[in-house]
Amino acid sequence: MSSGVMECRTASHASGRPLSPVAVVCPITLTTESFMSATGRKLFVNSRVTDLEQAKRFSGALGCTCNPQLTDENAACMIISDEASFMLLTDGFLRRFTDRVPSDVTAVTEAMDALSEDSRAEVDRLTEAARSAGATTAMPPQDHGFMYGTGFRSPDGHHHEVSWMHPGHDPVAPAVRLPGPSPGA
């Protein structure tokens, strides 16, 4: 990375953990090519919002930080982690990127964004922060012993899942049967 990137202010996660220099607001302009080659692949989850300022406040309450280089009156880039960001897009701006009608997330589930946390307590803390910022419950807490999670809907209706998995759990072990109908039933 260039020395200019290393001089950037480091953003912090809501828990106080610093994010790496990749997820900071830099006083220099990076080209797409230098950004991607310096940091690897990134995930940008694009979501249509009805009130951009409210959506920015909600994302901030969840610990996301705003990247002003990718934010204006049409969109806001809210950094989740070093590798992922929410792109909050106004309806008119989102429609510039698709030839399909956007879904009404207050009536259907468009997608479920899943975030992991370091502990059960962090899952509960983030879920409570979401509720305090206007979220509604999408799924009650589910405890599977090795994994714990819950879900909520943002004020715009987007479904978010938050989970923790025990660090000693072997993901290659036989699958745990979750409640509900069998696949293909």
Image (tube, helix red, strand yellow):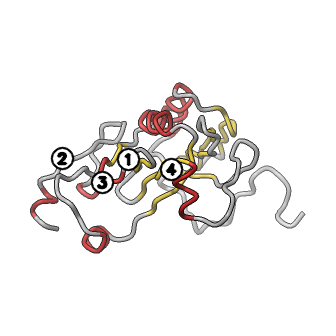
- Measured in 3D between alpha carbons, the distance from the residue under mark 1 to the one under mark 4, in whole angstroms, is 10 Å
Determine the CA span between mark 2 and mark 3.
10 Å
Residue at which label 2 appears: 9
Q: Amino acid at mark 1?
A: Asp
User: Is 139 displayed left or right of 133 in the figure?
Assistant: right
Q: Is residue 58 shown left or right of residue 13?
A: right
Of 162 and 45, nearer the camera is 45
Q: Position of residue 75 (x, y in %)?
A: 44, 49
Observer-side mark, 2 or 4, equals: 4
Q: Residue at x 46, y 59 (%)?
A: 44
The residue closer to the viewer here, 144 or 14, is 14
Identify the residue under disc 4.
Answer: 89
The crowd level at tag 1 (other Cα within 10 Å; few <14, some 14-19, many 20+) is few
Which residue in the protein does label 3 denote?
23
Image quadrant assignment for residue 57? top left
Q: Judging from the image, what secondary structure is the residue with disc 1 in?
A: loop
Q: Amino acid at mark 4?
A: Leu
Label 2: few (<14), some (14–19) or many (≥20) C-alpha neighbours in 10 Å: some
Indicate the secondary structure of the residue bearing disc 4. strand
Extreme residue toward the top, this view = 132
Say whether residue 180 is left or right of residue 151. right
For label 3, the crowd category at 10 Å Cα-Cα, with few meaning under 14, some 14 to 19 and many 20 or more, is many
Mark number for residue 72? 1
Callout 2 amino acid: Arg
| Residue located at (66% from left, 46% from top) | 144
Q: Earlier in the sequence, mark 2 or mark 1?
A: 2
Q: CA distance from mark 4 to mark 3?
A: 20 Å
Label 2, label 4: how far apart the Cα atoms are = 26 Å
Q: CA distance from mark 2 to mark 1?
A: 21 Å
Task: In the rendered structure, find residue 111 and report the number of the disc placed on it.
Answer: none
> Where in the figure is residue 176, as x and y percent of width and height?
70, 58
